[in-house]
Amino acid sequence: MARALIGRTVRRLRAERRLTQQTLASRLGISASYLNLIEHDQRGVTASLLIKLAETLGVDLGELSGSAERQLAAGLREVFADPLLGADSVPGEEILELAGSAPNAARAILALYRGWRVAREDAGGIALPSGRRILLPNEEARDFFDEHANHFPPLETAAETIASGLASSPHEMNHAIAERLRRAHGLTVTVQPLAGALRRYDPAARSLTLSETLPRESRGFQMAFQLALLEAREAVDAAVTEASASSPEAAMLIRIGLLNYVAAALLMPYAPFLDSARTLRHDVAALAARFGVSYEQACQRLSSLQRPGERGIPFFFLRVDPAGNVSKRFSAAGFPFPRHGGSCPRWIVHTAFAHPGEIDVQVSELPDGAAFLCFARTVDAPAAHWGDPRPTHVVALGCVLAHAPDVVYADGLDLAEARVGIGLSCRLCERPDCRSRAFPPLEHRLALDPLTRGTSPYRFEA
């Protein structure tokens, strides 16, 4: 629980419901003075009181955790630290206050900053050869999934409706989906060489062709995607309409992401998958084997188990390439991903590349003291042909330490002693002694001395 933010969250939720401190305190069975201390982060909140707060305010525990405010605060730090804005330094306390008490204003600031960055890039000559402006539709799509905590109840319902007509065990699901496509839609599925593509659907010929380079679990996912495209269109259309995307490109990225979501929910049904995850203590490799899916598919599904009243562990999910580019990102755990620039080189997401195929585990501690159990592993895609490098990524999951006892990867770890200090990014990190620092922090002046060589390449004044 992010104590620095929960008081503001409680205060904001109370104000939104037009409740006085006395009224809310009375409903909670505590004094108004005690509630006032809670709202100003001068008193902690017990588990029983936290549950009572959630019930009284009509929210789930996740909304009281401060994870959304923490993500907003991380984004605001990046905004206010940008030297090109020429803004005066904004104290961290003011940033936390803005994120906690005025989240809509904070989101508006982030939207304005993104728009300014696009305009700045265009003004500096960074534009497509055609002259068309760069619109960053991928960021818009990521924001949409983050706002929904990567969980979409109508799509879960659509997937369950489709699955009820298949009545198949996980290991027979590929055959069942292929038969459903053939019988219900007159669609033939073939596997053969497919130049320049992994899946190709021809509506006129009623054929779905899958590349022979795809492994079995990926063929199953592509068939599930096709079935979602044909049978979950209404639910997906409604979600895309709700997104109100600013461009056709952003809308299409959101649509494809939602279809992928339905495909995953079809192959890994919510209740059986959640039950298996708890039984196996979130052993991803064992989950992937049980449901006949890939390691990455199982990881991503774990990040979406946020059904009210039947929640799984709130994991964040990340996929990154060797250059540090993030191609997928979901933050149900409230991990404050940096929006621009690289992340910390000490984080396991990057160090896992040194141990291909192995699951690396790290207790990662941010500068504000928030700690996460993180585990990561490399995954490889097939090469197109001999001599072509295999695309390699690291996929990572993480959760707050409170959930560590329910995760098999925490076994044998001393959660207090095994912590590794990381930052959001070098430009935002204030750790003075980091030997991995690539850039000086934006909010501090350098303190350079030719007579001394410190442990960090950039010494700075606190």
Image (cartoon, rainbow, N blue to C red):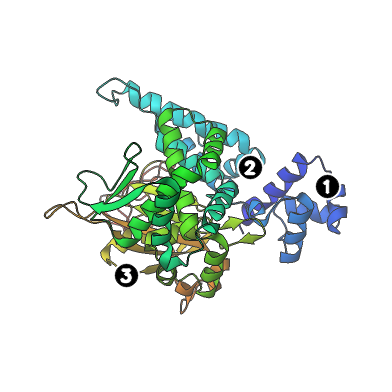
> Given the current orientation, which residue lies at the most extreme bottom position?
412
Pointer 3 residue = 358
Whether residue 361 is visible, yes or no, is: yes
Q: Residue at x 68, y 48 (%)?
A: 9
> In the figure, is residue 101 to the left or right of 405?
right
Which secondary structure lies at badge 2? Answer: helix
> In the figure, is residue 429 to the left or right of 53?
left
How far apart in space, not on screen, are marks 1 and 2 (Cα)?
A: 19 Å
Q: Earlier in the sequence, mark 1 or mark 2?
A: 1
Q: Residue at x 25, y 50 (%)?
A: 450
Q: Position of residue 240 (x, y in %)?
A: 52, 36
Q: Residue at x 76, y 62 (%)?
A: 49
Look at discs 1 and 3 and give the one toward the viewer.
3
Pointer 2 residue = 97
Q: Quadrant of residue 54?
A: bottom right
Which secondary structure lies at badge 1? Answer: helix
Pointer 1 residue = 21
Q: Quadrant of the N terminus?
A: bottom right
Amino acid tagged 3: Glu
